[in-house]
Amino acid sequence: MPALPIYLDNHATTRVDPRVLEAMLPYFTEVYGNAASRGHSFGYQAKNAVEAARAQVAGLLGCSAKEIVWTSGATESNNLAIQGVARGHSDRGRHLITVATEHKAVLDTFASLAKEGFDVQILDVRRDGTLDLDALGAAIRSDTVLFSAMAANNEVGVLHDLQAIGAICRDRGVVFHTDAAQATTVNPLDVNATQIDLLSISAHKMYGPKGIGVLYVRRGRPRMKLAPILHGGGHERGLRSGTLDVPSIVGMGVAAELAAAGLSGVGDLRARRDRLYKGLNAGLSGVHLNGPALDDRAANNLNVSFEGVEAEALLMAIREIAVSTGSACTSATLEPSHVLRAMGVSDALAHTSIRFGLGRFNTDDEIDYVVDKIAVKVTELRALSPLYEDQPETATWP
Ligand SMILES: *Cc1c(COP(=O)(O)O)cnc(C)c1O
C-alpha cells in the first residue's frame, strides 16, 4: 500500500527536488546580496550564482547563456515574448497567429492584443489535437510577424512538430515562439535544431521553485526587437527590469541541470503512464482516450473520459488521489476545457474527463492503487447514474 495522498497532478506543478532546495538555501541567509551590486563581495557572489544558473539553463536548451532572460514564470515569459514581438515589430506588420489549444497565458495575451487592434488569427486543430501545417502555411501573410505554438500541451500532451514549424516560420520570416513549460522534463528541446526564436519555461514544472521562469530570446539573425513590459533598472539587458530573485534562479539552474540529466529516465515515466492506461482499460469499459495516441504524446500525460461519470463527482470519490478534471470550475458553470472543445470532444465527454500528470516521484505501487481505486469508484458511480447503462451496446451515453 503506497503512502497517501498520491500526487498525479504534475502538469499543474511539481514537487521541488531536494537537491534544488539544498542549493537554494545559502542564497537566503548567506549570499544575500543584490546581483546588481557591483561594489562588494555580497553582490559579486550573487551575480556569479546567477550567471552559473544561466549557463545551466542554456545547457538544457542548447543556447548561449546570453540568450536567457529571467522572469517570474512561463506566464510572464509568454507575455513578454508575445507582447514584446507584437509591439517591437509593429512597424513591419500587425498579424499574429496562434493555436486554439494554447495555454490561457498565450490565448489571453493574444486576446488583449486583439483588443488593442492587432490582427489575431487562431488556428484550429485536428481531432487528436495536432496542427495542420498546410493551414499554418496558408495563414502566414506578408504582414505576419509572430506564430506561437506550445511544445507539449498541458491537458492532453500533444507534441506539435516544432522542427517543421520552425522551418516554415524561418522560411517565411515569421518569429516563432513556443511555450515549452510542459516539455522540459519529457521532451529534449534544442532551440537551434528546431529554429525556435523565443521559448518560455517555468521552474515549478520541472521540480524547481514557483515564481521563477525563463524566456529564451534568440540573438543574431533574424534580428529580434522585443519591447519590454516592465521598465526600471534595466536588468536583463533592459528586457526585464527588477531585482533578480537569486535563490530561485539558483534553484532553476539546478532544476535545469537535473532535467537535462533526467531525460534519460523518460522511458520509466512512459512505462508507468502506459501501465495506468492499460490498468484502467482492463478494469473498466467506456474509457475514452482524449488527445493523441499514447506513443505520440508527452510521456507523462494521460487524459481519459470515463463514460457516464461526472469528473467532479469522481474527484470527490478519490480524494486521496490528486488529479484534475477537464472542466474549469467557475462559480456558476462548469465550462468544458477549451482544449478538449477545440479537439471536438463533446461537452458530455469533456465533463467526464480526468487529467493524470505523472512525475519522477511516482511509483508502480501508486499506479496500481490508483487503477484499483478508480475502477471501484467509477463502477459505483455508474451504478448510481440514470444516464449510464452497464452494457456498452445499450449505453445511452453520450
Ligand atoms: C504552467 C504553465 C504555464 C504557466 O506557468 P507559470 O510559471 O505558472 O506562470 C504556461 N504554459 C503552460 C503550458 C503551462 O503548463
Image (spheres, rainbow, N blue to C red):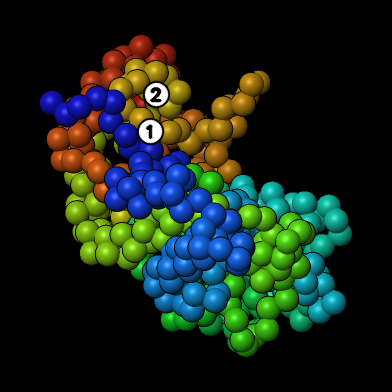
The residue at the far top in this view is 384
Which residue lies at the image location 20% right of the left edge and 27% below the top edge?
3
Whether residue 277 is situated above or below residue 176 in the rendered picture? above
Q: Is residue 26 visible?
A: yes
Position of 347 relative to 230 (above/below): above
Label 1 neighbourhood size at 10 Å, few (<14), some (14-19), many (20+)? many
Q: Position of residue 49 (x, y in %)?
A: 45, 63
Tell me residue 252's x, y (percent).
43, 56
- Is 367 on the left or on the right of 119, as rendered? left
Residue 137 appears in which quarter of the rendering? bottom right
Give SS at disc 2: helix
Q: Position of residue 85 (x, y in %)?
A: 72, 69
Q: Nearer the viewer, residue 346 or 79?
A: 79
Identify the residue under disc 1.
323
Identify which residue is drawn at 54% across, 69% down. Answer: 68
Image quadrant of residue 88? bottom right
Q: Residue at x 77, y 51 (%)?
A: 112
Q: Is the C-beta of the residue carrying label 2 under 8 Å from the nearest atom of ligand 1? A: no
Secondary structure state at the residue bearing disc 1: loop
**Closer to us: 89 or 48:** 48
**Rendered-image quadrant of the N terminus:** top left
Q: Is residue 319 left or right of residue 193?
A: left
Q: Nearer the viewer, residue 283 or 260?
A: 260
Q: Is residue 102 visible?
A: no
The amino acid marked with disc number 1 is Val
Question: Mark 2 — residue?
Answer: 315
Give amino acid for label 2: Leu
